Amino acid sequence: MRTSARPAPRVLTLSLPEARRLAVASQGFGARPAKPTIDHLRRLAAQIHAFQIDSVNVLARAHYVPAFARLGPYPVAALDALVYEKRELFEYWGHAACLLPVSLYPLLRYRMDKHAEWTQRYMRLRRGAYMARVYAEVAERGPIAAAELSSPGKRGGSWWGWSIGKKTLEHLFDTGLLAIAGRRGFERLYDLAERVIPRETREAPAPPRDQAMKQLIVLAAKACGVGTFDDLTSYFYIDGWSDRSGPVPWRWARAIGQRAKPVAPRLLSELVEERRLVPARVDGWKEQAYAFPGVKPPSTVEARAFVTPFDSLVWDRRRLRRLFGMNYTIEIYTPIAKRVYGYYVFPFLLADRLVARCDLKADRKRKVLVVRSAHLEPGHDARRVIPALAQELQELRAWLQLDHVEIGERGDLAAKLRRGSGAKRALP
């Protein structure tokens, strides 16, 4: 008996404003709770899946800011508690280094297990004796920092100036043999994974590599609302250089070698065939888009937030241009004379638009939130933006436990914002 061909899935059609509202809402922006709690933080982590970690501390550590942007003044200690006390989040490579819900641990095992066989074999060889000693020392003394190893080795000129001890610890962390048990300041403390990751999480079945990658793409689609192939695969760096690298870890490989062929295009096609994703078309987008079945863009989005450069809303700069029309670059590594907007610039989200950008700094010694520059995005009305921007600055100041706000001279919005907010003029 012949069976009829399965009908093609219906294409979801969205206007650009609808796609923008869907993206902002899917990222957890909306009405803020009156008093944010650890439960709000749990739900947010389950929705966007990752808080990116970065060492820049000009305003606050990057992984603390996204929750404030969505929830308002939440207790920072609650995030640390979820990671290092309750073990509901863990540190690993998601979109770069991230705090991730432990529910993702089985889905990321394919990354951890990739070099497990090589690592175990290497530690049994003479040339792997140092790695074996490091692992044994962590087992005996952990949690410990790289600098606390009995033989950390000298700092080198590669791998960010890491010592051989730090390089070794990071590899053992990559393979899942070690995990991050805590931090001293920003310094990682390493311990055996079985002493950090909950037992039920470690013993949960790990899906085969392709199935895990497909599930991560689906989760990315939920977090993005709607996105292109690159949007969805880059959220967790699916099929990126690490996923496609060879059996020898890159830190120990003498040559990078040829990458494996990409598999993500096939996986995305399968997800559409399986009805786990639906094709979508967004007005003005040249590329095919995809969405989670049944999604509907909200009619409005109530959002007011400074978005850190490491926020998942702005990870992909090409997506940022498509959704918001903003050309955005982190200028930290740009020479001062060539910077356009400033050192550590935060886009400002109002409703479903990025309407301004501010270079922010917490002067902790003077207890001042400094706005070093403020620029209005083209096409937006300063009279609408300034009241919301001034209110958010005051809430951010209070959350950071600073006393007042100062606003500098740089940017077409700076003087107007200073007058509209009653803030002091920043020191030159």
Image (cartoon, rainbow, N blue to C red):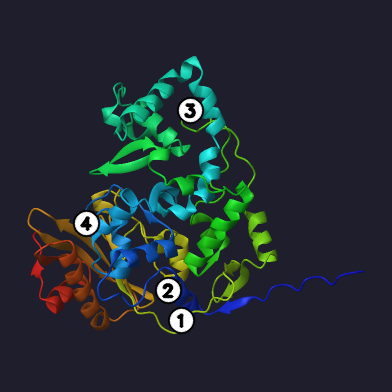
* Direction from residue 223 to residue 341 in the image, left or right: left
Q: Amino acid at mark 2?
A: Ala
Quick one: label 3, few (<14), some, or many (20+) residues within 10 Å?
few
Cα separation between marks 4 and 3: 36 Å
x then y, percent, for residue 424? 8, 69
Identify the mark at residue 59; answer none if there is no mark. Answer: 4
CB contact under 8 Å: marks 2 and 1:
yes
Q: Which residue is mark 3?
A: 252
Mark 3, secondary structure of its residue: loop
Tell me the quarter of the image containing the N terminus: bottom right
Which of the two labelled residues, at mark 4 and mark 2, occupies the earlier sequence position? 2
Q: Which mark is residue 298?
A: 1
Using the numbered discs, state the Cα–Cα distance from disc 3 to disc 1 in whole angstroms.
49 Å
Q: Residue furthest top?
A: 126
Q: Which mark is residue 259?
A: none
Q: Earlier in the sequence, mark 2 or mark 3?
A: 2
- Amino acid bearing label 3: Trp
Give whichever of 155, 126 is nearer the camera.
Answer: 126
Q: Residues within 10 Å of mark 2 (few under 14, many from 20)?
A: many
